[in-house]
Image (spheres, grey):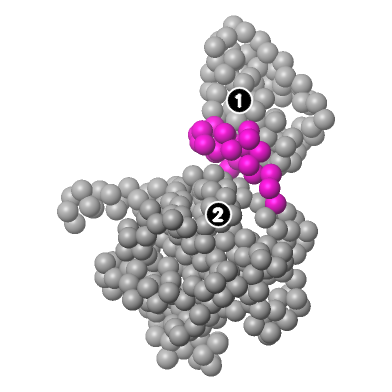
Amino acid sequence: MTELVIFLEDIDPVVFYGTNNFLLDRIRGFFPKIKIIARGNELKCMGEEGEIAIFAERFNEILEYYRKYNRLDEDDIEKYFFDAGHMKSASEGQFEEVIVFGTSGKPIRARTVNQVSLVNFYKVNDLIIAEGPAGTGKTYTSIALAVKALKEREVKKIVLARPAVEAGERLGFLPGDMKEKLDPYLQPLYDALHDMIPFKKLETLMEDGTIQIAPLAFMRGRTLENAFVILDEAQNATVSQLKMFLTRMGVSSKFIMTGDTTQIDLPKRSESGLLQAMRILSGIEGVSIIRFDERDIVRHKLVRHIVRAYEKEENESRTNGN
């Protein structure tokens, strides 16, 4: 039996351990063979020598992560112990770069490996396709990059679009004018912008056309120059719609398409332009395709398990030929 004592220097144990030692208990869960006793800034660990050595290495990495990023939550702990790519990115400081500061002054950063890839690919490519499950931060990170580009005068306007796929309700039967009918489809885009631009400033930018939010159909006939253009929910754009959208790209523009190919709401899955685009645009210079997965999910911890359960069900259905 080996005993190890770790001292938390310059760290508030109440914050680091979490409310009622919640975060410490999550760490304990990864090392069931080790007895871990916390007393203030002192952590006493008892177990087999090999287990203790592994624990000490991982725990010190977690401490460095906390010191570097001044945060630690359950999601961070799970990623750190399960995702080697996340650990490597964390140790290299790739989560330190601030994309933009939010309305409350809170820095908005890439928080997962694929979010970092999105930021890095944006720097060298003009068209990015980000595909993956809900909650992975594809759209949020893209909008943060767009706001950054506008603030730094890399572009003159931001255009955000979504296909107005009728999810069980026909637009014509909904109350209100066209804007009121479409706003529910576009609300997630408004929400992200409100996180990053003060309300009055955002209102002004939208009134003068510097920031535009519109359904995909409104893109037809336009040439978008000096613009940062994001198509959200691209899996619900048909082949012809997506071709139309991509050919709107003008000089000095950046285009990002985000979508989840497991949530296609079109009558036929084969009609999704995103599936085709990912297939035929792969390998073209200036185009990057990033596939997000459950490791990138930054919403409630249950979302990861929900996504995993649905993927399992879909894979079994395909295997059984249903």
Q: Amino acid at mark 1?
A: Arg
Work out whether residue 83 or residue 13 is closer to the camera in this orientation and state it. 83
Sequence-wise, the earlier of marks 1 and 2 is: 1
* Quadrant the N terminus occupies: top right
List x then y, in percent, for residue 87: 57, 34
What secondary structure is marked by label 1?
helix
What secondary structure is marked by label 2?
helix
Numbered range of the magenta stretch: 75-98
Residue identifier under label 1: 58
Whether 186 is drawn above or below 84: the answer is: below
Q: Residue furthest left?
A: 321
Whether 308 is drawn above or below 221: the answer is: above
> In 3D space, how far apart are the residues under numbered discs 1 and 2 (Cα atoms)?
34 Å
Query: Residue at 37% of width from left, 73% of height from top?
Result: 243
Residue identifier under label 2: 124
Q: Is residue 247 magenta?
A: no
Quarter of the view holding residue 163: bottom left
Whether residues under marks 1 and 2 lie with C-beta atoms below 8 angstroms apart, the answer is no
* Quadrant the C terminus occupies: bottom left
Query: Residue at 50% of width from left, 80% of height from top?
Result: 223
Whether 207 is drawn above or below 93: the answer is: below
Residue 81 badge: none
Query: Residue at 57% of width from left, 34% of height from top?
Result: 88
Q: Amino acid at mark 2?
A: Val
How many discs appear? Answer: 2
List x then y, in percent, for residue 44: 70, 17
**Crowdedness near tag 2: few (<14), some (14–19) or many (≥20) residues, C-alpha within 10 Å:** few
Majority SS type along the magenta span: helix
State whether residue 275 appears in this view: no
Numbered disc in front, either 1 or 2: 2
Q: Is residue 82 magenta?
A: yes
Query: Residue at 72% of width from left, 64% of height from top?
Result: 152
